[in-house]
Image (cartoon, rainbow, N blue to C red):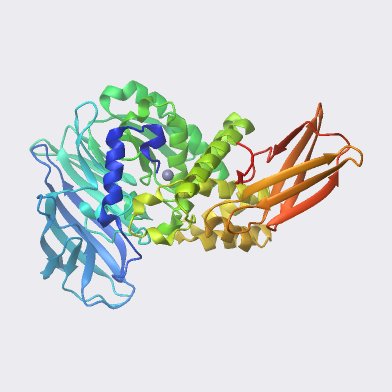
Amino acid sequence: MQKLYPYFLNKKYFIVFLVFLCNSFLSAQLPTNGLDVKHYAFNITLNDDNNIIKGTAIITTDFTENVDKVQLDLVKKNSDGKGMTVLSVTKNNQNLQFSQDAQHLIINDKGILGQENTYTINYEGIPADGLIIGNTKNGDRSFFADNWPNRAHNWIPCNDHLSDKATSEFMVIAPDHYQVVSNGREIEETNLPGNLKLTHWKSEIPLSTKVMAIGVTKFAVNNLGNIGGVPVSAWIFPEDRDNGFKSYEFSKEILKYYIKNIGAFPFEKLANVQSKTIFGGMENASCIFYDENSVTSKDVESLMVHETAHQYFGDNVTEKDWPHLWLSEGFATYMTDLYLENKYGKDSLRSLLKQQRSEVVDFSKKFKKPVVDSSEAKNLMFLLNANSYQKGAWILHMLRRRVGDELFWKSVRSYYETYKGKNATTDDLEKIFEEVSHQNLKTFFHQWLFTSGQPYLKIGLKYDKVTKKETLNIEQKQDTVFEFPLSISFTNGNQTIIKTFNIKNKVTQEDFTISFQPKEIKIDPNVDLLFENFNLE
Ligand SMILES: [Zn+2]
């Protein structure tokens, strides 16, 4: 996903963001409930009179261990009247006893390892979060799911952790002036008595709850075309039709790039949806939700490149747990850098990397945290930070320079092929890169991903005109010593040489000969190292 900042930073959203930072229900850890859900079928009824939703969830689950009670995530109705009340739970048409606590539905039924059970849960209530019911900027009523990271259980009973993927379908009954978009393929659209309409979408590809979604409002829908067998569409608020149809056209070119460089698109279609997500963009699988102002944003192209990358990295190959979020956000950020380099040239990559490097350095001054950060299980919104995005991107960039373009892309494709439809960890990525490149990357991964900070270098250079000898002194001023290549360019008039030094120690001294006296010296001239310069800037 992309935070509203830097795209559309405004106070309203910043306050929303802060509220989430403080919300304790965003805490999460690997689920211990023994569930492995196979399929969700959600029947959801929406209306125009009030914000109460009525739901019937049919949930088929396996068990990874024997359990005495079956526990699903579902937010219970609170003192503000928001949350879900369960009316009944059945299995094989038999009523089961159940109870609710603030965050869970507990069903009195035994789960047996390896045995599949199907539960039918009737419930209703006003969503406290997760399904945003309100008005579009044009004043039309709208309903947009916004499940990331674990807000789905505000409106649907589920195993609300990204490690449990299941196929899913949504059957939405809503007033017939609305259109409904969701994950997967549209199965049915039928007018019902009472000016209602049933719309049925089904995803045959297993998804995490964080990327399941429905979007319901008045839409203008443009079928943009078919790219590599994938129907691409734009779903735009009717008042924004012209702007939206035009700006979301980028989707086709972007999808082509990913199909060529990563592989076949994983999902049934690609719908680009103007929405009320609290984020700048949210990578719901096969129906990306964009902020409602995106249709007139100058940054819409890079936003779409980012969210489309997530269809591969984040949605189809999903990090196994939250500390590995950079496998989503670092990948989406660097894939965007690569796309823009390919389209606009090397200078555009360099300027993006410089910007991203300064964001990483700024963040590291405030927070001493590694990218793979296990300490933030209680505050998932905090993980939407420069470590997950910009530093993740930088690490991929340095990995690319280390193994070379050809092996970099080969490794990325191999990682995608190996883990598509599944979950992966940082170690899994390391193994793939090591297998493909035949390099030992242990130190690289350890220092960049599991250690906080980056090299903070004091660099001294002295030229002796008589001997033509240049003396280089480098001191690593940060706590942990890093290993990295550092390039320096020496220029005089039209003569330039670039020398690369492999730095391994706290202090490095090297002498070398240069036939001319350098007038201009550039540290890291091609922007290939994540570091901070002690002397310059
Ligand atoms: Zn993202």
Q: Residue at x 22, y 58 (%)?
A: 157
535 relative position to 304: left or right: right
In the image, residue 317 above or below residue 219:
below
Task: Tell me where residue 77 sits by quadrant.
Answer: bottom left
Front-most of residues 284 and 472: 472
> Which residue sits furthest top?
242
Q: Residue at x 81, y 46 (%)?
A: 471
Q: Tell me where residue 246 appears, x and y as whole percent.
A: 40, 24
Front-most of residues 99 and 385: 385
Q: Tell me where residue 414 appears, x and y as whole percent.
A: 57, 55
Front-most of residues 507 and 2: 507
Ligand 1 in which quarter: top left
Q: Tell me where residue 110 appears, x and y as whole percent.
A: 21, 76
Front-most of residues 328 and 192: 328
Question: Is residue 421 shown to the viewer in this render?
Answer: no
In the image, residue 451 above or below residue 331:
below
Q: Quadrant of the N terminus?
A: top left
488 relative position to 338: left or right: right
Q: Tell me where residue 160 appears, x and y as whole percent.
A: 29, 58
Question: Is residue 124 shown to the viewer in this render?
Answer: yes
Q: Residue at x 35, y 65 (%)?
A: 30
> Which residue sits furthest right?
466
Task: Tell me where residue 15 sits by quadrant.
Answer: top left
